[in-house]
Amino acid sequence: MKIGVLPGILLLAHGGPSSLEDIPAFLEHIRGGRPQSEDLVDRVREKYRLIGGASPLSEIADRTARKLEKACGLPVYVGMLHWHPLLEDTISQMARDVVNRALVICLVPHFSELSVGGYRGRTASAMNGTGLAFDFIDSWHTLPPYINGLADSIAASWRELGSDAGIGSHVVFSAHSLPKTALPPGDPYPLQLQETAECVAARLGLPPGGWTVAYQSASANGQSWLGPSVEQILVELADRDIDRVVVCPFGFVIDQVEILYDLDIIMKQRAGDLGISAVRAPVLNDGSAMIDSLELLVEQWRG
């Protein structure tokens, strides 16, 4: 950092509704202001009702920011893409606080132009004219504390399954699927997912046939999405008489509806129907592996 620069950290996340009453406005924001059908609102509302009536994402992101602030000694802000605090409002607050250079970190480890690229574009637009410069971290998918945190999470899940060092079980690494037609040629997302999985597999000593990368939470909109899906992999594993599975949602670092509903409810039901004992590995949330990962990124930025 140069003398006279007041640095700050901005953590970005997707956002999630704070209550069931927020869901229509939340969906409208995601879909660019278009009114949503009552059927869609009801279906989404039911998902959130089943996970406690709200998304925990904002609260966990805020706890993460406060811990990182304590660890690095810099002001840390949180901005959301689709719910409060919106990243535009947060950037305005940073400018009022006279922060003039920011390190921007998405709470998404893997880069895709469709996902993290969207965060970067929104950040650049919001900072235009504020006098606030920023450095944007595109990905942190092989950062050692992140890899170690995933490995520790899987090891804890093995103990829950009663599987000694994973013997007799399979690890499914899951990440949010994306529509194939929306991905630019050469988009690094699938490759980065594979690289992360390989790092974790090496850390745990997993054999080549002992793990798989899969995708989850694809929308039923008629488009072709990245696969195979977690459900497809579970069917294949059942056909191979593998009945103990750890699903590690390594594409997510904070609990949200894609974890608490799509995996903890729907995936586990499907696994049970197939005769599979499935355990979902805990995500990092605001634990030490997450804070260590973010602190390392800040240290590298500060030089």
Image: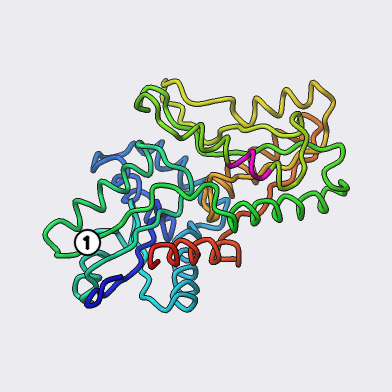
Does the segment drawn in magenta span residue 198? yes
Q: Using a 10 Å C-alpha cutoff, classify the residue at mark 1 as few (fewer than 14 neighbours), some (14 to 19) or many (20 or more).
A: some
Q: Is residue 247 left or right of residue 62?
A: right
Question: Residue 152: x and y, percent?
Answer: 71, 56
User: Eyeballing the image, is 22 above or below 111?
Assistant: below
- What amino acid is labelled 1 in the image? Ala
Query: Which of the 4 image quadrants contains residue 94?
Result: bottom left
Residue drawn at (63%, 32%) of the image: 230
User: Eyeballing the image, is 52 above or below 189?
Assistant: below
Residue drawn at (46%, 63%) of the image: 61
Image quarter where the N terminus lies is: bottom left
Residue drawn at (41%, 25%) of the image: 221
Q: Is residue 266 left or right of residue 301?
A: right
User: Eyeballing the image, is 121 above or below 69?
Assistant: above
Question: Residue 168: x and y, percent?
Answer: 86, 37
What residue sits right under mark 1 in the picture? Answer: 133
Residues drawn in magenta: 196-200
Report the front residue among 186 and 18: 186
Question: Residue 166: x and y, percent?
Answer: 82, 43
